[in-house]
Image (cartoon, grey):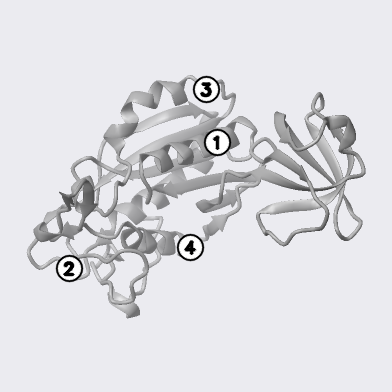
Amino acid sequence: MQIKTGITLIDKLEEKERKEFIEPLREQVVKSILNLRSPFKPDGFYFNPESKAVYKDGKKQGGNGVTTIKEPFIENLLKLGWQKEFPSIASEAERITKISTLKNVGKSKDLIYGHVVSFSREEEKVVIKDRKGNTQEYLLYSDCETSEPDDQLVGKLVSMKIAKPGGLDVCRTADNKLFAVEWETGNISSSHRALNKMAVMLLNGYITAGILIVPTKRMYPYLTDRIGNYEELKPYFTLWQSLKIDKGFLEIIPIEHDGLHDDAPILKKGKDGNAKKPVVVDPSNGSGHTANQMQLFLLDENK
């Protein structure tokens, strides 16, 4: 797999922190990308020319599954001590958006239930007693929607809807610092959400560094669905660069296949068990395993 020229949107770290924290972990990310190989030909990452997506009735059909490409990359980082789906819990990123009064406690896992103890838009805070009688405090947006006047909420049984930025693909902690990596598998809106999520967490100090991995426009036609790509994000770079972040690192890494080959398998969507997955090879000898018996090799950071 190739890495094309990308962009560092934010780079506000001391030199010592960059050398001791950013550079070693970024190198692990870079190696795990560059060493992605096609299962049939370990000298590079190839697409079958017949897998190029076409549009029929306004919908994109064909292409290669993105998740199938992403999984070996994630698994290799896990071998290096990264954590998968690390929760992006951050006080400024999770706030109550809607409060509704109820007669009975519901069962939705997406809502928070309890009796209101106090409510203040000025302090942007709501306190409730949950079903176990424990007192819980939550931040809320000042324009939070409520089903009753604010001064009538105290004592009422309510459900609360919370805005969450979602989990991070992989993270690595070191010296109380958090390095986050997102591999784009969604559309351009998803790419924006991924960058915004990491930007918010940089703003509130929850993470120290973040990287978004996206395909190039040249790679895009060989992927399923309407995957976000680097070129589509370019018009918005100045927005993220203008953020007033005192400390942090945020980068976009564009990736691209090494070429086309008639023998390359078409990579299935999602987690289809019949999909032949790419592998991360040992750069010292080019070895690797494919399909269901695939093994991912631990990269030697000293190479």
Q: Are marks 2 and 3 in contact (CB under 8 Å)?
A: no
Residue at the (17%, 68%) spot, across then down = 265
Left or right: 99 as drawn, with respect to 154: left
Mark toward the viewer: 4 or 2: 2
* Amino acid found under the numbered disc labelled 4: Leu
Distance CA(mark 2)–CA(mark 3): 43 Å
| Residue on which the image places disc 4 | 78
Residue at the (14%, 54%) spot, across then down = 52
Residue 164 tag number: none
| Residue on which the image places disc 2 | 265
Label 4's element?
A: helix
First reached walking from the N terminus: tag 2 or tag 3: 3
Estimate the x, y position of residue 78 in percent, counting from the top left: 48, 62
First reached walking from the N terminus: tag 4 or tag 3: 4
Left or right: 175 as drawn, with respect to 272: right
Residue situated in front as seen by the camera: 238 or 224 = 224
Label 1's element?
A: helix
| Residue on which the image places disc 3 | 243
